[in-house]
Amino acid sequence: MRPSTENFEIAPWSKVVVWITIIITIMMAGISTMFIGKAFSTQDTTEQSINVLLAAGIAIMLLLFFVFMPIGYRLDDVNLTVLRWGPKRRIPVAQIESVGQIDASMLRHSIRVMGCGGFGGYYGLFSNKTLGRYRAYITRNDNLVLVRLKEGRPVVLSPKEPELFVKAVDTAIN
């Protein structure tokens, strides 16, 4: 039997995420361009090499932001998958204990441990007193869904239609 698969759109970016993404992109592109300009304006090959490497490093960082930002969710009989341009994050359905909608207050006073705090969304490892350490793959602070796992950290997602998402995941785990 072929597993059933359902795709879920991610919630549209909040205004804050849009502005952070635009500002960081412009800043990083500008800084990278500045280093390239410095590389072409000097005769010192060591300085040229350093400036080109710095420009390339900034360009790679910018690319990595895009590679890891969440772009959707997929649910099948085996996994709940966070879709990204790069490696997907798979959560085995068998490991999901519960799923439910939450409100933004659950994320209040969160600290980013490792990840991104606004460029294309909020994704990575975060921590606060309410949830402890948790993973987030969200694009705004509403439409939030909390996936509690039997083992491991809770996961916060932001599907466009949270009610349908919760119902589908709940059906898959029960």
Image (tube, helix red, strand yellow):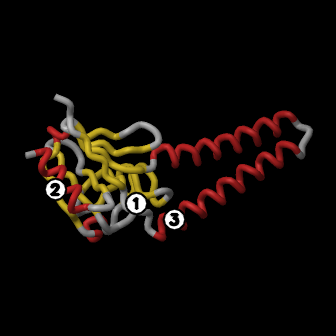
Instruction: Of the two numbered discs 1 and 3 on the same chain, state the one appearing first in sequence.
Output: 3
Tag 2: residue type?
Answer: Lys
Please tell me which residue is depicted at 51% across the width and 65% down the height of the picture.
18
Residue ID for mark 1:
139
C-beta proximity under 8 Å, tags 1 and 3: no
Would residue 163 be found to the left or right of residue 29 on screen? Answer: left
The residue pinned by badge 2 equals 167
Q: Are marks 2 and 1 in contact (CB under 8 Å)?
A: no
Image side of residue 30 versus residue 8, left or right? right
Q: Residues under labels 2 and 1: Cα distance?
A: 21 Å
| Residue situated in front as seen by the camera: 144 or 60 | 144
- Asked if 167 appears above or below 14 in the picture, the reply is above
Q: Residue at x 42, y 44 (%)?
A: 84
Q: Which numbered mark, 2 or 1, is in the foreground of this view?
A: 2
Task: Give the residue type that dot 3 points to.
Answer: Val
Instruction: Name the image quarter holding the N terminus.
Output: top left
Can you give x and y, in whole percent of width and height, for residue 87 in the image? 42, 37
> In the displayed image of the protein, which residue is found farthest to the top?
1
Instruction: Indicate the amino acid at tag 1.
Output: Thr
Q: Quadrant of residue 99?
A: bottom left
Q: Secondary structure at mark 3?
A: helix
Residue 56, located in which quarter of the rendered image? Answer: top right
Q: Percent position (x, y) of residue 171?
A: 12, 49
- Could you say whether the residue bearing mark 2 is in a helix, strand or loop? helix
> What mark, if any, has residue 18 been given in the picture?
3
The numbered mark, 2 or 3, whose residue comes first in the sequence reads 3
- Cα distance, mark 1 to mark 3? 9 Å
- Please, which residue is most extreme toward the right here? 43
Measured as percent of width and height from the top left, residue 69 is found at 45, 49
Indicate which disc residue 90 carries. none
Q: How packed is label 3: few (under 14 Cα within 10 Å), some, or many (20 or more)?
A: some
